[in-house]
Image (cartoon, rainbow, N blue to C red):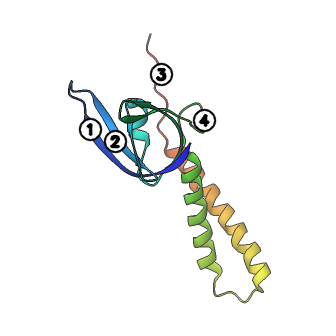
């Protein structure tokens, strides 16, 4: 099932176990697997499976985009690309180029900006820690 997370709230069971409450497309669900807690945000569209348990609908699995659990990668990539395209468009907005050529130039600049941003992000990424023996 696919849906957009409208609201997320922290909850605690009677025995003190933490879980999340989620409102997805107007329906309330519970999520008990902590590995997902820090990866979800309101507005995310998720693909998930759920199971009824008494009066509750428990999310049992969230299908990730990759093996590392990065289902938001595509969303962040789109944000970066749109930002670069906006910047490129603003840069050439007052040029005398015909509209078709202006679009080509804007896309060319946007690709350069995107490469710059992504390369910079990779350079800023922390080095993996080496295991001590």
- Where does residue 69 sit, x and y in percent of width and height? 53, 34
Q: Hey, which residue is sitting farthest top in the picture?
A: 133
Give the image quarter of residue 114.
Answer: bottom right
Tag nearer the camera, 3 or 1: 1
Contact between labelled residues 1 and 2, with CB atoms less than 8 Å apart: yes
Badge 3: residue crowd in 10 Å (few <14, some 14–19, many ≥20):
few
Q: Secondary structure at mark 2?
A: strand
Q: CA distance from mark 2 to mark 3?
A: 37 Å
Q: Which residue is mark 1?
A: 11
Q: Which residue is mark 3?
A: 130
Disc number for residue 21: 2
Tag nearer the camera, 1 or 4: 1
Q: CA distance from mark 2 to mark 1?
A: 7 Å
Q: Which sits earlier in the primary sequence, circle 1 or circle 4?
A: 1
Q: Which sits earlier in the primary sequence, circle 4 or circle 2?
A: 2
Q: Nearer the viewer, residue 57 or 21?
A: 57
Q: Secondary structure at mark 1?
A: strand
């Amino acid at each position: 099932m696919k849906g957009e997370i409208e609201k997320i709230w922290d909850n605690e069971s009677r025995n003190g176990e933490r879980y999340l409450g989620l409102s997805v497309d107007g329906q309330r669900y519970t999520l008990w697997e902590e590995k997902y807690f820090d990866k979800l945000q309101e507005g995310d569209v998720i693909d998930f499976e759920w199971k009824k348990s008494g009066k509750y609908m428990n999310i049992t699995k969230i299908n990730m985009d990759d093996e590392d659990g990065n289902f938001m990668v595509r969303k962040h990539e789109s944000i970066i690309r749109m930002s670069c395209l906006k910047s490129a468009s603003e840069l050439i907005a007052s040029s005398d180029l015909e509209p078709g050529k202006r679009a080509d130039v804007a896309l060319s600049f946007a690709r350069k900006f995107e490469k710059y941003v992504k390369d910079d992000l990779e350079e800023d990424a922390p080095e993996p820690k080496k295991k001590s023996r």
